Image (cartoon, helix red, strand yellow):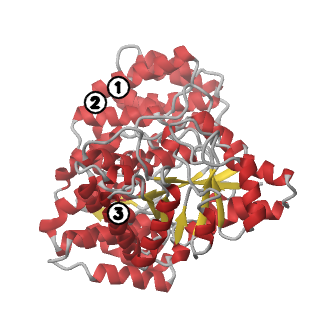
Amino acid sequence: MPRATLGAMTACVNPESLRQLIQQAVPDAAFRAFSDQLERLQPDFALSAFLGAFTSTARTLGRKPLGADEVCLRGASGDLPLAGATTDVAGRMLLLYALAQVAPQQLTAAVKSAYEEGDSHEKLAVMRALPLLPEGERFIEIALDIGRVNELDLFSSLAARNPYPSRHYNELAWNKLYMKAVFIDVPLAQIIGVETRTNPELARMALEYVEQQESAGRRFPNEIWLVIAAHPPKGAVGKLLGYLSHAVADLRLGAAAGLERAAEPRTLSFLQERASVETDERVRAVVERTIHKLEQQRS
Amino acid sequence: MHFFDPHIHMTSRTTDDYEAMASAGIVGIVEPAFWLGQPRTQVGSFIDYFSSLIGWERFRAKQFGIAHYCTMGLNPKEANDPRVADAVLELLPRYLQKDGVVAVGEIGYDDITPAEEKAFSAQLELAKNANLPVLIHTPHRDKKKGTERTIAVVRESGVPEEHVLIDHNNEETLPLVKETGCWAGHSVYPDTKMTEARMVDLLKRYGLTKMIVNSAADWGKSDPLKVPKTAEAMRGAGFSAADIEVVLFENPVRFFEQSGRLNRGDMVAPKIDQAELFEGNSVLRGQVPRRS
């Protein structure tokens, strides 16, 4: 099954751009109504008025695709892709971002109320907005709370296409989040920052997960090998070599990517043997690339 | 044939019920906020209950292809409880703003006390401010007097009568409601309240206009399939498919559409994905998820 990935993102833009993106995506009257609410955000605004605007945004702007799948926003906690964003989420993100500019001293309380009193859609929008807000670490309890829910859309708003966890989570929280994403089938390619947050403990957890799935006769996502291969526990490379000659080409592909990541000199002869018999072009490309790298390393 | 059950407390029901309702043709429901069978002693219990009506329960219904809407209110029984009443009234304006909240309710009288009257009037005022319809419960005891008084309070409040659904009617109270512009709800129950056969007689006698039927199924002995079962009884009594559609789908949908927050699109071939989970819970326990 093909999995959506982060895709080709163009250069990231200022979060203010949300205003134009929303304007392009909704009817003029809806945008005017929303703009009026934005204009009313002043330093002395009443919290209840802000929360009312935040809640009613889905009715003002509707829940339609924003149509900005290639765009990403430059946030305080990292780059935030807008792939898959809807107009209600974009509007609520912009309200929170605007509030951070206009009335920074009220931001913490507003974010807390918007989240705690929010329905699932409001909670999701808060999570998407967190990477845009200054001093993002103060909101970590919200992120951890969302990490405990299993409504897929809500959990994915944190785990997928969001720079917040890799930026602010400690190792334990990060590892738990990654493994839960594996368990509830979040496309792993959409998790931001995996490459910089691999660690031996995560590799151990991931390998044990693979073994558990094997015992149960169930599949596991190919991308999990990248986490395992970054710090291969005992037996992991052997297992990868086993999968490299599996009858199913997709499994060979995952193993080849894992072996490329592991870059273990002792795998060279196995890779060369595989290259001589491999029939799947995707697999052969990865295997040959890895062979080339290992040979260069040796010389 | 598709149906709308405009009054059902799904929080108290099982996934078997959801499954049976979906296969009987129920595509949308309204879950009114009510009491849970035992008194709540602190306002936090209401916050969590209201949150579940716009969160977990909505998600659970969606997994069976049923669109879930709700009403928010302080019910008359607990309006009598000073430990929670005022705090819940303060909480309500925030929850009345939420998407999918299609009315204030269920409010009204239970024991017909001054505390109930105070909460009732205050919530009619909230409904006016939020421009939401109102779902009104009528008492089990002293029902006729309670209904007369309900109508008087509604008229005094200035809430437009077409924004009001007076529920749990029977042969004694329906004539009173029919003299107003309010909509008339009927809870078809095993044994008490109203039966399918009596319901059919009322429809023959009073016509279909502004007539609404629900199961009011909850944690007590009740039947979440009473709406489709009433369709069966109507068919048996010679009502056409179009008549059944009017009473068991169009009327309740039109009433709650006045909120501006009911979307008919949610009830057409809804997307089901049982692989979705909510807050650590799946409604599945090892079964293969159903997707459509």
Q: Is residue B45 left or right of residue A210?
A: left
Tell me whether circle 2 and circle 1 mark residues in contact (CB < 8 Å).
yes
**Image marks 1 and 3: residues in contact by CB distance under 8 Å:** no
According to the picture, the residue beneath numbered tag 2 turns out to be: A199
Residue drawn at x 33%, y 62% is B119
Number of dots carrying numbers: 3
Q: Chain of mark 1?
A: A
Residue for point 30% across, 79% down: A38
Chain of the residue where label 2 is placed in the rendered structure: A
- Helix, strand or loop at mark 2: loop
B122 is higher (above) or lower (below) than A229: below
Q: Residue at x 67, y 43 (%)?
A: B225
| Residue at the disc numbered 3 | B117
Residue A44 lies, in percent from the top left, at: 14, 77
Mark 3 neighbour class, 10 Å CA radius: few under 14, some 14 to 19, many 20 or more: many
**Dot 3 lies on which element?**
helix
Can you name the residue that lies furthest to the left here? Answer: A105
**Left or right for A298, reference A105:** right
Identify the amino acid type marked 2.
Asn
Q: In the image, residue B255 lies at what x, y percent?
A: 59, 68
> Quadrant location of the C terminus of chain A?
top left
Q: Quadrant of residue B166?
A: bottom right
Residue A217 visible, this orientation? yes
State left or right for residue A31 relative to residue B179: left
- Contact between marks 2 and 3 (CB within 8 A): the answer is no
Chain bearing tag 3 is B
